[in-house]
Amino acid sequence: MHEELENFERNNVWDLVEPPPNRRPIGTKWVFKNKRGEDGMVVRNKARLPGVSSKEGIDYEETFAPVARLEAIRILLAFAASKGFKLQQIDVKSAFPNGFIEEEVYVRQPPGFESARFPDRVYKLRKALYGPKQAPRAWYARLKSFLLKSGFVMGSVDKTLFLLSRGGDTTIVRIYVDDIIFGGSSHALREFEMSLMGELRFFLGLQIKQGPEGTFVHQAKYTRDILKKFDMGILNP
């Protein structure tokens, strides 16, 4: 929780202000999440502070943000294999609070972290939280703008895919919520605070093995989970 709020401070996410008249602030709550690897083990613990109960036309207008399709993931894996480089996975710390919002949005102070001097004040958002409906759109717009200014070219069909070719080197980037898959150099993404999770092994339920002989995709974990769910894990002789 402290790490999440420290990220907010570094990113200038909000300002503590007097409650505005005729505006009802959005509530906040803590949400805890475990990010798991292909073996089901926890690889990262996260605390998120989403805003809740936002209203269309008041707290947000547009909410659309492109999402990655499984077909597009397969094409990405095939492209990376043809180029001979391994795909890596990056976790962006507090990804959504990197996105700027256009609406005037106020949220209540985080539970357990209320100001002792100004307990009745609220936060006015400069950037998005995880709860407001426009947050994915704001994050995507921020990252897309940065990548395009850095020389990347956006896919004409898949809007979550970006490609940079410079001096014979190729860097490919795919956006998926707060995860980024990339092949090539990660220096192009140093604008944001990130954690390198290593070689891409598990994504959207797909287990991925990248090797010199090719890239293999399977769903062994998903199959085991289904068999266990229906008590079919062990076959009787």
Image (cartoon, grey):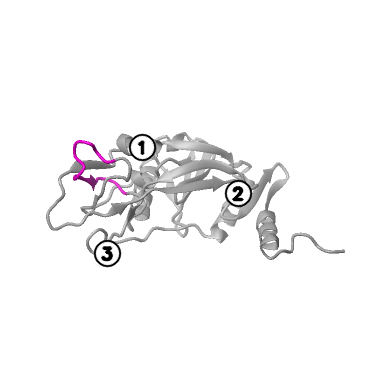
Residue beneath label 1, please?
7
Give the residue type that dot 3 points to. Glu
Residue 88 visible here:
no
When the figure is inspected, residue 62 is found, relative to residue 49, above or below; the finding is below
The stretch in magenta equals 114-128
Q: Residues within 10 Å of mark 1 (few under 14, many from 20)?
A: some
Q: Residues within 10 Å of mark 3 (few under 14, many from 20)?
A: few
Q: Residues within 10 Å of mark 2 (few under 14, many from 20)?
A: many
Residue contact between numbered discs 3 and 2, judged by CB atoms under 8 Å: no
Residue beneath label 2, please?
202
Q: Number of callouts in the render?
A: 3
Q: Is residue 61 magenta?
A: no
Q: Secondary structure at mark 3?
A: loop
Pointer 3 or 2: first along the chain: 3
Residue at image position (56%, 41%) is: 43
Q: Secondary structure at mark 2?
A: strand
Q: What is the x, y in percent for residue 170?
A: 52, 41
Q: Nearer the viewer, residue 169 or 110?
A: 110
Residue at image position (44%, 51%) is: 177
Residue 17 sits in which quadrant?
top left
Residue beneath label 3, please?
56
Q: CA distance from mark 2 to mark 1?
A: 26 Å
